[in-house]
Image (cartoon, rainbow, N blue to C red):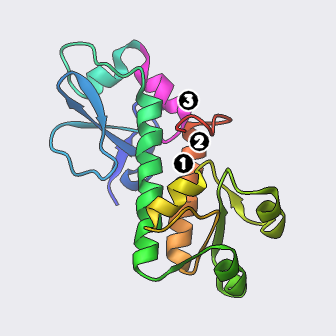
Amino acid sequence: MPIRTCVGCRAEREKAELIRLVHYEGQVVVDYQAKLPGRAAYVCPRRACIKEAMKRGRLARALKSEQPLECDDLPEKIAEAIKAQILALLGLAAKAGKLVSGWNSVRAAKGRLALVLIAADASENAREKFAGATQLWLTKEELGRAIGKLPRSVLGLLDERLAERIARELQRYDAVNPGDRDLLR
């Protein structure tokens, strides 16, 4: 796996562990899928690294920009990209038949589930019934829309690899927004 250096903390990490940033028309664009053309800079998915990268023109130098770059909202842009990735993975799991949704389906599949997710606006009753579930900042409406259904308060992932990937993305989101889980609502 290729190694890249974080612009913020200067630590060397595998490319897949970092977030790719690209310069486009005077702005910094988050290239979460690593598909955009052009010179890129990389940053750890941690708020401290992102803030450090934004200081004293570090990011502009890394991207070889001759003018200052607009990147005041970079942590929010990165959080948005991570959120979009989580929702896309949930949609993928639903299409692949690796996800169950709704109280009854999740309870029926309880022994086979790799990860249970519960919406931020789920009822107190739902939170009690699924006490071991991972609490999300996403709403029932967002969860339902991600899987192409009506609002859902509880989702269960049947596939271990998808569950691990979603859990990793949730950790990335929390690292970008420590203590600020309502940022994107």
Q: Which mark is residue 86?
A: none
> Image quadrant of residue 141?
bottom right
The residue tagged 1 is: 172
> Image quadrant of residue 116?
bottom right
Which three-letter amino acid code belongs to the residue tagged 1? Arg
Magenta stretch holds residue 53:
yes
Task: Answer whether labels 3 and 2 touch (C-beta < 8 Å).
Answer: no
Task: Answer whether labels 2 and 1 touch (C-beta < 8 Å).
Answer: yes
Which three-letter amino acid code belongs to the residue tagged 3? Ala
Residue 114 on image: x %, y %:
63, 77
* 136, above or below 8, in the image: below
Say which label, 3 or 1, has the lower sequence index: 3
The span from disc 2 to disc 1 (Cα, nearest Å) is: 5 Å
The residue tagged 3 is: 48
Which three-letter amino acid code belongs to the residue tagged 2? Ala
Residue 24 appears left or right of 55 = left
State the predominant SS element of the stretch in magenta. helix
Closer to the observer: label 3 or label 2? 2
Q: Which secondary structure, mark 3? A: helix
Residue 159 on image: x %, y %:
53, 80
Point out the image quarter for the N terminus: bottom left
The span from disc 3 to disc 1 (Cα, nearest Å) is: 13 Å
The residue tagged 2 is: 175
Q: Which secondary structure, mark 1? A: helix
